[in-house]
Image (spheres, rainbow, N blue to C red):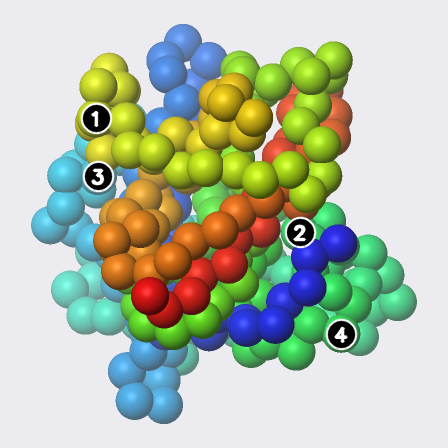
Amino acid sequence: MATINHTFEPSRLLLVWHHLRDDSPRHRRVVGEIYKDGSHFCFRYTKSTEDFRLAKLEGFIGYPAFTMNSSEPFMDVLDVFTKRLPPRKRADFGKYLSQYGLPENFSGSEMALLGYTGARLESDSFELCPDYSEISGPADLIFDVSGASYHVTPKNLPEEEAPVQFERDPENIHDSSAIAIYCNAQLIGYLNKALTKGFRHLLETMTISGKILKAQVKQSKIQVLVHVKCRTK
């Protein structure tokens, strides 16, 4: 299991909406952001972005707690999003943490917990992603490999602790900014699109090392978790 020596404490989280219609490709669209303003945590829709425009065309009608008609940011919103997490006092909270490679004694803030877990629910199509471009010092990151089910089978699951490499994939027909993830020279998937911009910054400014944290068949899908250590050059 991963050792979290340097918890990344984000001050900005991206709200990602998944377009899940069966008759079209699956898309991740960044539609909003949670950010810190002084002592307040605020939320706003990223209405000026191409992702937001495309999300609306694909059927996005907003996050249930926040109307899209407001021109002002929503204040003190952290409780709205932490409701997507089980209470820390629950007896099985340690088991919940272990699903994401986090230790039972994880002491990060609520923002960090939202960022590491993604705060995903089976009942909707949202997740939260941290802004990695904020990282300027040592940090331990853990994230799912996107698209692993298309590149890995139950017969060739990568072994835990096996090193991984990250490579830009400008020829990718779906996303020219994609970052491919390899293990033992085999493509195992891609970095979550919402994380790409910040992670490219890390590749340019930090020393990055990664390894397989967990690889398993989960609900008929392949789940691969990667543990990444970022260090200053």
Report if the CB atoms under discs 1 and 3 are less than 8 Å apart: no
Q: Residue at x 75, y 54 (%)?
A: 1
Q: Where does the image place residue 55, in percent across and percent down from the top left?
A: 26, 34
Q: Are marks 3 and 4 in contact (CB under 8 Å)?
A: no
**Which residue position is annotated with label 2?**
100
Q: CA distance from mark 3 to mark 4?
A: 37 Å
Which dot, 1 or 4, sits closer to the camera?
Answer: 1
Q: Which of the numbered marks, if any, corresponds to residue 28? A: none
Q: Residue at the location (40% across, 38% down)? A: 166
Q: Earlier in the sequence, mark 1 or mark 4?
A: 4
- For the residues labelled 1 and 2, the Cα–Cα distance comes to 29 Å
Q: Which mark is on residue 105?
A: 4
Q: Of discs 3 and 4, which sits in the foreground? A: 4
Specify the amino acid type for callout 3.
Answer: Asp
Residue furthest to the right in view is 91
Residue at numbered disc 3: 51
Q: Secondary structure at mark 4?
A: loop
Q: Earlier in the sequence, mark 1 or mark 3?
A: 3
User: If you read the primary sequence from the N terminus, does the residue marked by circle 1 or circle 2 appear first?
Assistant: 2
Q: Are marks 1 and 4 in contact (CB under 8 Å)?
A: no
Q: Residue furthest left?
A: 48
Residue nearest the viewer, comparing 61 with 30: 30
Picture quarter containing residue 151? top right
